[in-house]
Image: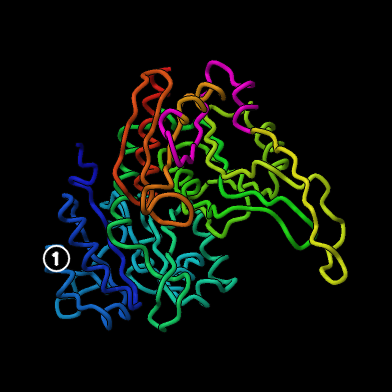
C-alpha cells in the first residue's frame, strides 16, 4: 500500500494547551510514516511540553522565536512557509485560532501560518465553554473560509474535569486525515467532484405536538460515510433526521428533515442531480394516520388507539427513478436469514449495493461507535464480510466498494 506521507514536509505548530502533550505522539507517528517534521512552538506551549522532547522526536531543532538570541541566527517564516507540504496546528487554542483568523502576527507560529503556501490543518483544543463561545465558532468559520481544514474537536473528559466537546482529535486520526489529503491529491478518487446524497438518522412521526414514534438511530454511520466520501473529493449532501452529530469534513451540506414524508420529498427532489445516493437513514415504516393537533390528555380519557399507515419506501421510489449512470446504495438491518433477505431487498428496490447489519452482532447497529457489516453488490453476486470496526473505518470500506462499483459501471 502506498505511503502518501513519505518525504512530506510537515510544519507542526504547537500552542499552549494541555493537549500539547499529544504533539509528541503526533510527531512520532508522522516521522514513522516517513514525513519530515519541523516543530514550531509558541512561548506558552513550552510550559506544557519541552522543546527537547519535540526536537528529539522530530530530529530537528524546535523553532519558537524569530531569531536565536545567542547567535542572532534569523528563522525565516517565509522559508518555512515555502518548505512545507502541509502545516498542522495541534493543539490550536482559542487564542491562536483568534490570531490566525485576525492575522495577528505577533509570534513565529502565526507568521509562519500567514506565509504558508501549503494546506493548513487546524486541530482545536480547549474547554467546552470556550469551544462553544460565538467568537471561537466565528473564528473557526473564518479559517474555513480561508481554505483551512478544521479537524474537529471530539467530546470527552476535559482538563477541567467537565465532559463535553473540546478534546483535540487523537494523533492517529490527524495522521489519517493527512494521509487522505495527500492520497486524494496524488490519486484522485473516481468520486471526486461527483454529487452524493446520503440519508441519515431517524425519522419522527408525530402522534401529537409533544409525542412521536421514532427509533434508536443516532446518525453516526451516515455522517461517518458523509465525512469519508467528502474526504475523497465528493460533493456530499446529507438529508438528515433529528440527530446530535455533525459532519467534520468541510463542505458537507446538511438538509434537516423530521418525518419520513419530508425525507422522501427531499430525497426525490435531490436524487436526479446526484451521481450516487446512499440510503443510510432508519426511516419509520409507519406513521399515525391522524396525528392530533393538540396534546392528548391522559386525565378522563381512555388510552388513545393509534391507527398506523404505511410510510413511502424511499429507496424503492428512488430505484424506480434511477438512471443507468446513477448508483443507489441501501442499508439493511436484519435479525434472521440476513444475506437472503438483504439480497431480496437489493433486487426488489433496484439497489446496486446493500450494506447489511445484523442485530445479532455485538457492537453493531444503533447507538454504537462501531459496526460490523457485510456488503453485497448486485453485479458480482459476492458477499464482502468485514470484522467489527469503528464506524469511520466501516465508512472507508463502504467507500472503497462504491468507488469500485462506480469504476465498473
Visible in this render: residue 111? yes
Secondary element under disc 1, as helix, strand or loop, is helix
As drawn, the residue found furthest toward the front would be 302
Looking at the rendering, the stretch of residues picked out in magenta corresponds to: 314-340
Label 1: which residue?
Answer: 57
Answer whether residue 148 is magenta in the image.
Answer: no
Seen in the picture, residue 2 relative to 31 is either above or below; the reply is above
Q: Is residue 151 left or right of residue 384?
A: right
Q: Residue at x 31, y 52 (%)?
A: 86
Which image quarter is the C terminus in? Answer: top left
Tell me how the rendering is colored. Answer: rainbow
- Locate residue 374, reporting x and y percent: 37, 36
- Locate residue 153, reporting x and y percent: 43, 64
Which image quarter is the N terminus in? Answer: top left
Q: Residue at x 48, y 57 (%)?
A: 367
- Locate residue 395, reporting x and y percent: 40, 43
Q: Residue at x 83, y 47 (%)?
A: 290
Between 392 and 336, the residue placed more toward the observer is: 336
Seen in the picture, residue 23 relative to 363 is either above or below; the reply is below
Amino acid at each position: 500500500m502506498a505511503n502518501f506521507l513519505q518525504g512530506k514536509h510537515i510544519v507542526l505548530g504547537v500552542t499552549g494547551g494541555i493537549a500539547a502533550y499529544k504533539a509528541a505522539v503526533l510527531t512520532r507517528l508522522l516521522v514513522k510514516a516517513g514525513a519530515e517534521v519541523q516543530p514550531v512552538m509558541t512561548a506558552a506551549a513550552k510550559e506544557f511540553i519541552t522543546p527537547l522532547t519535540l526536537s528529539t522526536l522530530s530530529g530537528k531543532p524546535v523553532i519558537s522565536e524569530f531569531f536565536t538570541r545567542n547567535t542572532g541566527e534569523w528563522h525565516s517564516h517565509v522559508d518555512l512557509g515555502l518548505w512545507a507540504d502541509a502545516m498542522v496546528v495541534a493543539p490550536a487554542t482559542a487564542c491562536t485560532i483568534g490570531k490566525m483568523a485576525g492575522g495577528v502576527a505577533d509570534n513565529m507560529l502565526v507568521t509562519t501560518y500567514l506565509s504558508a503556501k501549503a494546506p493548513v490543518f487546524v486541530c482545536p483544543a480547549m474547554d467546552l465553554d470556550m469551544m462553544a463561545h460565538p467568537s471561537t465558532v466565528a473564528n473557526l468559520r473564518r479559517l474555513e473560509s480561508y481554505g483551512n481544514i478544521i479537524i474537529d474537536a471530539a467530546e470527552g473528559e476535559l482538563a477541567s474535569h467537565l465532559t463535553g466537546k473540546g478534546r483535540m482529535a487523537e494523533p492517529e486520526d490527524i495522521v489519517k486525515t493527512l494521509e487522505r489529503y495527500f492520497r486524494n491529491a496524488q490519486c484522485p478518487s473516481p468520486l471526486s467532484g461527483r454529487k452524493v446524497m446520503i440519508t441519515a438518522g431517524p425519522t419522527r412521526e408525530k402522534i401529537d405536538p409533544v409525542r412521536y414514534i421514532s427509533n434508536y438511530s443516532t446518525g453516526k454511520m451516515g455522517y461517518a460515510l458523509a465525512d469519508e466520501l467528502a474526504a475523497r473529493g465528493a460533493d456530499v449532501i446529507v438529508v438528515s433526521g433529528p440527530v446530535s452529530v455533525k459532519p467534520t469534513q468541510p463542505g458537507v451540506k446538511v438538509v434537516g428533515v423530521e418525518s419520513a414524508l419530508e425525507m422522501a420529498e427531499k430525497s426525490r427532489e435531490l436524487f436526479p442531480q446526484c451521481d450516487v445516493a446512499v440510503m443510510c437513514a432508519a426511516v419509520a415504516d409507519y406513521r399515525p394516520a391522524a396525528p392530533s393537533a393538540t396534546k392528548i390528555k391522559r386525565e378522563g380519557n381512555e388510552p388513545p388507539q393509534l391507527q398506523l399507515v404505511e410510510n413511502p419506501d424511499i429507496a424503492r421510489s428512488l430505484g424506480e427513478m434511477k438512471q443507468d449512470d446513477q448508483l443507489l446504495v441501501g442499508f439493511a438491518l436484519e435479525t434472521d436469514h440476513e444475506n437472503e433477505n438483504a439480497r431480496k431487498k437489493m433486487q426488489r428496490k433496484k439497489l446496486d449495493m446493500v450494506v447489511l447489519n445484523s442485530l445479532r452482532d455485538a457492537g453493531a447497529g444503533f447507538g454504537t461507535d462501531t459496526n460490523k457489516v457485510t456488503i453485497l453488490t448486485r453485479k458480482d453476486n459476492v458477499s464482502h464480510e468485514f470484522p467489527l470496526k469503528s464506524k469511520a473505518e466501516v465508512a472507508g470500506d463502504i467507500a472503497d466498494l462504491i468507488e469500485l462499483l462506480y469504476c465498473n459501471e
